[in-house]
Image: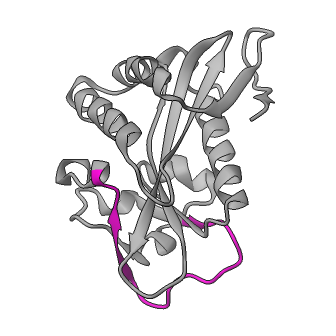
């Protein structure tokens, strides 16, 4: 991946790259700083579990670095539709940026880089469970999310949105799916 020019207060450039196992401790530090106390342990465990996943297609994680310091993280996990649809999909979760770098485009750079990566890989759908006001600026829509039924009841259904990454059609009726084992925790939904 190539460096990303963001409007930082420094002349340094943010670089986005695939995460590696050696990044896990730094990723968990970012998560602990970025999430409220009641969430950070759950999300920290999730990130560790996602690194252990061995699925086909694979889980894909990206990190953002500035001056050699890891400042952001995003993970994309495949979904497995229970229907006969040939649509391939991923879930964006989690996304974390160190508080001192939030609202400076780091999260957007991670999401856009991930969308580019998944599009090049031929992925058709990207789903997310989060603040719809934030994610709508990337093209996530509630009507796409409604076509994919999560494996657990949602605490905040309005936060379930999706987007198409290619020209293939979405399912005609809502389709149930399974997630990777790391996301098979009702507390995350």
Looking at the image, residue 43 lies above or below residue 178 = above
Quarter of the image where one finds residue 156: bottom left
Q: Position of residue 135 (x, y in %)?
A: 54, 51
User: In the figure, is residue 132 to the left or right of 124?
Assistant: left
Name the quarter where the C terminus is drawn: bottom left
Residue nearest the viewer, comparing 22 with 5? 22
Q: In this view, which residue lies farthest toward the bottom? A: 172
Could you tell me which residue is drawn at 50 percent across and 73 percent down? 144
User: In the figure, is residue 22 to the left or right of 3?
Assistant: left
Quarter of the image where one finds residue 124: bottom right
Quarter of the image where one finds residue 82: bottom left
Residue nearest the viewer, comparing 79 with 140? 79
Q: Position of residue 47 (x, y in %)?
A: 36, 35
Number of labels in the image equals 0
Could you tell me which residue is drawn at 39 percent across and 17 percent down? 29
Could you tell me which residue is drawn at 63 percent across and 20 percent down? 65
State how the image is colored.
one colour
Name the quarter where the N terminus is drawn: top right
User: In the figure, is residue 184 to the left or right of 51?
Assistant: left
The stretch of residues the image draws in magenta is: 163-181
Q: Position of residue 23 (x, y in %)?
A: 49, 22
Residue nearest the viewer, comparing 3 with 137? 3
Q: Is residue 51 one of those drawn in magenta? A: no
Could you tell me which residue is drawn at 66 percent across and 32 percent down? 17
Q: Position of residue 155 (x, y in %)?
A: 22, 56
Looking at the image, residue 189 lies above or below residue 178 = above
Q: Is residue 179 one of those drawn in magenta? A: yes
């Amino acid at each position: 991946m190539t460096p990303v020019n963001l409007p930082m207060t420094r002349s340094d450039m943010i670089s986005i790259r695939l995460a590696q196992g050696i990044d896990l401790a730094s990723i968990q530090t970012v998560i602990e700083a970025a999430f409220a106390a009641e969430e950070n342990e759950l999300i920290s465990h999730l990130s560790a579990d996602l690194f252990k996943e061995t699925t086909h297609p694979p889980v894909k994680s990206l990190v953002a670095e500035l001056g050699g310091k890891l400042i952001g993280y995003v993970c994309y996990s495949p979904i497995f539709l229970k229907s006969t649809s040939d649509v391939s999909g991923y879930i964006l979760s989690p996304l974390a940026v160190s508080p001192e770098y939030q609202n400076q485009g780091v999260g957007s750079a991670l999401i856009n880089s991930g969308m580019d990566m998944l599009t090049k890989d031929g992925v058709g759908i990207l789903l997310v469970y989060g603040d719809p006001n934030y994610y709508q600026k990337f093209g996530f829509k509630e009507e796409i999310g409604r076509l994919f039924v999560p494996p657990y009841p949602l605490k905040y259904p309005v936060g379930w949105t999706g987007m198409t990454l290619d020209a293939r059609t979405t399912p005609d009726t809502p389709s149930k799916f399974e997630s990777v084992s790391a996301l098979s925790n009702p507390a995350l939904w």
